[in-house]
Image: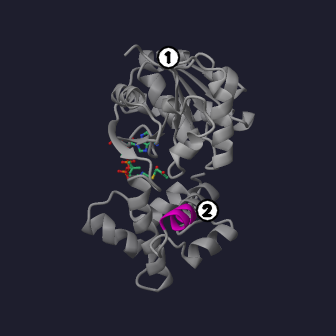
């Protein structure tokens, strides 16, 4: 496969991380965001990530400079995607926004360009439904922090072609990720499994089973998880977790994914986790 030209639409936590790994891997990358402030912040975050990588000996100054030369930012999604062979969207988790974006971009990209969504739970088949060529769409689900996490969850929609999946596998290898391929079902493999632990930990906290640090230590020390489920919920964002839980509760039924009241209450109070400074823990100076 020739080196892909990558467009990343949405420059938040996930988008800037995806742009970073793709640029480091040798791709020309264009990054955009609806907010010019967010785009400027993402550029700084990427530069800081390269500086840290140099400090740790994971990348040389020459590699950083070459990667930053391959990276451009533009204001419009259409302009960003025009030359891309792989477009990856990491915009907010709303089906209507993602459908509209893909339909718009399909009109400007080349006939064989891939349209990938970084969604963590929305249906790829539904996101691709308005496309003239839904065979080119799929899920490419990355994990936070993108430079560190090894997995790329490739989600095959009802119409996704084998060639599209193969191109995604090639891209995973190029950016140093291990792919798994999952059929388009609610929560795919990762959210369906991960959210269960997070919600059950919140229910245990509600029921006074143990304190938040002790619930987290149970899985950190007893099962070798790098981070307990409550701390991880803080990192992911309580609002993000609540949206995924509501979606899984609606689509899969039963009580497994019913959002706990404590989660709802915290989101209403604006306690969204690391990004707001308060979640199940207090996060000082980490926003
Ligand atoms: N960017 C680049 N490198 C980073 C980084 C970042 N943001 N954060 C940490 N690292 C690197 C560190 O430099 C360090 O590298 P070395 O080993 O080479 O020194 C390594 O990762 C470990 O970092 P630390 O020693 O600082 O801290 P740690 O051991 O606690 O690891 C962690 C940090 C990797 C984030 C670890 O805590 C972890 O794996 N946490 C769980 C992460 C997780 O589960 N992510 C998935 C969330 S769900 C999701 O993203 C999908 C969704 O749909 C919502």
The magenta-colored residue range is: 245-252
Q: Is residue 14 above or below residue 279?
A: above
Residue in the picture at 44% in, 56% down: 191
The image shows residue 31 at horizontal and vertical percentages of 61, 27
Query: Is 247 within the magenta?
Result: yes
Query: Is 78 within the magenta?
Result: no
Q: Which mark is residue 65?
A: 1
Residue in the picture at 44% in, 73% down: 256
Q: Nearer the viewer, mark 1 or mark 2?
A: 2
The image shows residue 238 at horizontal and vertical percentages of 57, 63
Pick whichever, 132 or 141, lies toward us. 132
Residue in the picture at 68% in, 43% down: 97
Q: Which residue is mark 2?
A: 272
The image shows residue 221 at horizontal and vertical percentages of 27, 66
Pick whichever, 184 or 287, lies toward us. 184
Is residue 43 toward the left or the right of residue 217 in the image? Answer: right
Pick whichever, 214 or 169, lies toward us. 169
Is residue 164 toward the left or the right of residue 259 in the image? Answer: left
User: Residue 180 falls in which quadrant of the image?
Assistant: top left
Q: Is residue 269 above or below residue 151?
A: below
Pick whichever, 178 or 231, lies toward us. 178
């Amino acid at each position: 496969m020739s080196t892909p030209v990558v467009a990343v639409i949405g420059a938040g936590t996930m988008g800037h991380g995806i742009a970073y790994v793709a640029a480091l891997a040798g791709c020309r990358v264009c990054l955009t965001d609806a907010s010019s402030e967010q785009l400027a912040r993402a550029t700084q975050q990427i530069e800081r990530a390269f500086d840290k990588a140099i400090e740790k000996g994971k990348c040389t100054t020459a590699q950083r400079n070459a990667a930053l030369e391959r990276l451009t930012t533009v204001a419009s999604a259409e302009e960003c995607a025009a030359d891309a062979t792989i477009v990856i969207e990491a915009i907010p988790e709303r089906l209507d926004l993602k459908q509209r974006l893909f339909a718009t971009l399909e009109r400007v990209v080349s006939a064989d360009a891939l349209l990938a969504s970084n969604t963590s739970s929305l249906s790829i088949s539904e996101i691709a439904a308005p496309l003239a060529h839904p065979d080119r769409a799929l899920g490419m689900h990355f994990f936070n922090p993108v430079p560190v996490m090894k997995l790329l969850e490739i989600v095959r929609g009802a119409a996704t072609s084998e060639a599209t999946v193969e191109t995604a596998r090639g891209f995973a290898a190029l950016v140093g990720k291990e792919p798994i391929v999952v059929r388009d079902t609610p929560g795919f493999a990762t959210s369906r499994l991960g959210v269960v632990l997070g919600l059950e930990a919140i229910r245990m906290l509600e029921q006074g089973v143990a304190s938040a640090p002790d619930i987290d230590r149970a899985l950190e020390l007893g099962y070798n998880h790098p981070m307990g489920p409550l701390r991880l919920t803080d990192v992911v964002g309580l609002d993000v977790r609540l949206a995924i839980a509501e979606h899984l509760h609606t689509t899969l039924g039963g009580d497994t994914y019913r959002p706990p009241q404590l989660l709802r209450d915290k989101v209403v109070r604006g306690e969204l986790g690391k990004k707001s400074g308060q979640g199940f823990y207090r996060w000082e100076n980490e926003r």
